[in-house]
Structures are given as C-alpha cells and as structure tokens.
Image: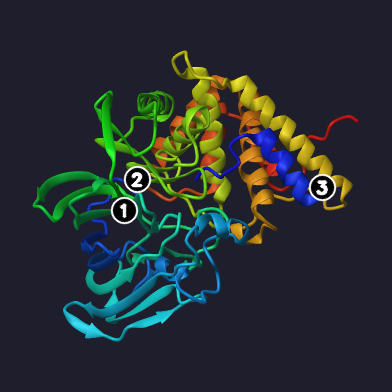
Amino acid sequence: MRKKFISIVSACALALSVCACSSSEKTDVTKYTIEAVLSEDNVLTASVVCDYVNNTDVPLKELQFHLYPNAFRKDSKFDPVPASKAAEAYPNGKSYAEMDIKSVNVGGKSVDVNVTGEDENILSVALGRTLEPTEKISVDIDYTLKLPNVKHRLGYTDKSVNLANFYPIACVYRDGAFVTDPYYSTGDPFFSECAKYSVKLTAPSAYECAFTGEVVSKTADETQTVYEIKAEHVRDFAAVLGKYQKISGLSGNTIVNYLYYSDEHPEAALQAAIDSIKVFGDLFGAYPYKEYSVVQTGFIQGGMEYPCLSMISDLYLGDAQTDIIVHETAHQWWYGVVGNDEVKYSWLDEALAEYSTMMFYDEAPEGYKYTFDAKRADALGAYILYCETYKNNGMGVTTMTRAINEYENETEYSYMIYVKGALMLDDIRNTVGSDKFVSGLKRYYSENKYKIAEPQNLIGAMEKTSKRSLNPLFDSWLNGNVKLYSSN
C-alpha cells in the first residue's frame, strides 16, 4: 500500500509539526468458490466453499479463517481507520459493517458457528476428523455482509464500492499455530497463501467492475449484471465497482485497464500502468497474469494493491497519482507474486515496492516528472530531518523489525518502512553493484514465486548473486544502527 505521504519532504514537515502459495509446482492448492450478490443498498449475500488443502506438515483438527469485515463492526477493539483520519474516511458520519455468518458446513455436515480471535476476527471451524498433510476438505460458509459507508478497502461511497478482504479467508499455519492477527489500522495487516478462485458476482447493472483474475462470462439485463471470474495463483481476491469510464491498452501480452470517474488526463494514468508492467517485468521477471486493472476509488490512503488490481485514491491526480500507480504496480511483484507476512515483516514488500518505484524512473520512457536521483535525495533529506528530530527529543531511532502494531504511529511506521527501507536497499545496491543487485531481485522473484518469503530469502538471494556476506549490513539497517544524521 502507498501511504498518504506522497511528497516525502512535505510529509516530513507535517510529521515534525505534529511531533514537536507455497511453490508454483504444487499439484494441488486451496480453492475458493464464491457466489455473491450485491444489492442496491450495499448488502452482500454470499457463500464461500473453501476446498482446503492441508499443505502443512502436521495433521489439523480445525481450520481458522480471517473475518476481516468484523473490524468495521460497531465496538470493534481495533478500528481499521486511524483516529486521525476518521473524519475524512467517514464524510457522512460513522458507519459500521454487519457480518452475519449464517451457517458453516464441513464435508456436507453442519457445524457450530464459532467466532473467536482477539477482536472477533476469526472463524474457528472444527473439522470433526484429523486432516492429514496433503489431504483436502470442503468448508462451506454462508453469510451476509452489510458494507460500511467508508473510504477504505472495504466499503462504499457515492461513486464506488470496494470489495476487498470481504470473505472468510484461511489463516496461514506457521510455527505450530494459525496466524490470526487482527485488522490493525497501521500498514497492511494481511497474510495469506496463494490459491485458486472461481467467483460469481451479481451486481447492479449500472456498475462497471474490475477484478482479480479474468472475467470468463458476463450476462446482463436491465437491473443486474452477472460476472464469472477465474483466477489462479493469486494471494487473495478483490473487486471494485462503480459508474466508471474505462480505457485499455497492452503491455506485452498483458491487458492493462484504467477505470475512472474523475480524471481529465486518463491516458497518462493508463500509460503509467503500462510502463510499470513493462519496466518491472524486464527488471524482476515476467508479470504472470493476463490482465491488470488500475481503478480510481474512494480511499483515505494513496493506494492499495491486490492481485491483478490496484486501488488508487481519488484524492490524487497528475504526478502524485502516477507515483502511486507505479508503487502499487510494483506490489504486483512484491506481495502479490512473492508473498510475505505483512504484519511481521512489513518492510519486506513495502521497502521493495518503494525502491522499485525509484528504480522505475531510471528505466521508464522520457516524460515523467520524477527521477531516481531526485527521489533518493528527497528520501535521504527527509530521513535525516526525521532522525535529527527524534534524536533531539531523546527518542532515538527505532528499528524496522517490529510488527506493524508495535510502531508508535503511522508517521513512525512510514519513515521506518518506506523511507528508511528504500535507503537500505539503495545502500545494498551501492555495495554489491547495480547489475548484481538487479540479478539478486530476479533470483528472489523466481525462487519465491507464489510462495511466502521471509527476510532471509531476500538476503540469501542477494548474497548468492553478489558472492558477499550481507547479513551484517542488512542487520545494521533493520535493527536501527544506521543513523544518517547531518553533520550539523
């Protein structure tokens, strides 16, 4: 996700004023079959059949599913909207989601609905038997979801509907337990395996839609449109609906779309997406999906990435919008294809996406406002000023190795993860040389495609290509020892 800190220097000034899938070779993966109907009053009636494959190495007696929409319910413990942005996110007053799990069936047999978790954010499903490694089981969940009127990943405005993280999604099993982090307001609190999706969505006919995956059929009458969508090797599924205009182009063999409702220069946004797909494909490895959509929508941050789909906030146009599009497109590689735990290791995809955005301007055709050198200089200047302020306040400089809920606020998170993260990767690049750095990213991408990566996967890829020991250098940045203070 691209935070709302678009201009790094101006953002720093604002902050200071406030401060004084496992392997692609798998023979079988989990599949979601979703049928959903969206009403005119923004209520989703849905069923999800999860054909879950136990790709762990241990027997399982239960499954757990994230219920991300419950974060938007009344009296939730963790509000997904930061308090500082509440007025902006809820222009019509506070609005809540209502998610009602109607029934759960396992292998055709009804089981109790058991909502648990730190913030009623988990659906625990007893299997009634032991699911051995490589075995499959079918879990059928029926539910309704009243969407909140909010400018966020899940919600509606008068111009668009965002359907992201809207269905029960299987928790990742790691280190002897399911990972059940709640929906924190800082960063992107998501973590999931790649899976297959077959989705049937019925929506009001006035809407144009963009999806994760490929639309394989579309039927419409005067009141509604029925879409059937297929997607494979994607980390999750999302859709955006609205009364859009749509333009399209090609980047190699990839169809690239731009959907918008308020943009005097839509061709520039489309071209940024087309160029990004090409540049990042050349740098890191081919984009593996047939279609990619960039969609203008109501969102309080700059943008948000989903497989084959990026939400771009309607707050930004022009050069700022272009920068967001490039950043979110970089996430198609870093988070989308190469996954990671975005709560525990948020820098792993965000720093890569931010630095990839900087690299884009060195490789892209002429005509873009930004340059690599200018963006790097902005990042360095902002980081030095940030560090000096915190040093003078006796607060020190924090590390990049904390979970997203352990940062003091969004400002601290943004400077540690985006700005410092990009500077760290630039230091690595200068240390090993540009050619070996790019080769390292190619290796990291190819070795971790559709998998869940951890920091050592990136460090190891860089060490293999450069034939140098880089753990100490990474460690000095990640653990807060690098302080690029000015000499004054």
Q: Which of 345 and 201 is in front in this view?
A: 201
Q: Residue at x 45, y 55 (%)?
A: 152
- Is residue 368 placed above or below 174 in the rendered structure? above
**Which of the numbered marks, if any, corresponds to residue 390?**
3
Q: Which amino acid does label 3 sit on?
A: Tyr
Kindly check if marks 3 and 1 are in contact, taking CB atoms under 8 A apart as contact: no
Kindly check if marks 2 and 1 are in contact, taking CB atoms under 8 A apart as contact: yes
Q: Name the residue under label 1.
A: 237
Residue occupying the far bottom of the picture: 112
Q: Locate residue 195: give its quadrant.
A: bottom left
Q: Which of 262 and 44 is in front in this view?
A: 262
Local crowd at mark 3 within 10 Å, few (<14), some, or many (≥20)?
some
Q: Which of 155 and 180 is in front in this view?
A: 155
Q: Name the residue under label 2.
A: 307
Q: Residue at x 35, y 46 (%)?
A: 450
Q: Which amino acid does label 2 sit on?
A: Pro
Question: For the residue labelled by badge 1, is the local secondary structure a helix, a strand or a loop?
Answer: loop
Q: What residue type is labelled 1?
A: Phe
Q: Locate residue 249: give its quadrant.
A: top left
**Residue 157 x/y as whole percent:** 39, 55
- Is residue 386 placed above or below 125 in the rendered structure? above
Question: For the residue labelled by badge 3, is the local secondary structure a helix, a strand or a loop?
Answer: helix
**Residue 419 x/y as whole percent:** 65, 38
Give the side of residue 240 with respect to residue 428, left or right: left
**Which of the numbered marks, if any, corresponds to residue 90?**
none
Give the side of residue 488 with respect to residue 447, left or right: right
Q: Which residue is drawn at 28% across and 72% down?
A: 144
Residue occupying the far top of the picture: 366
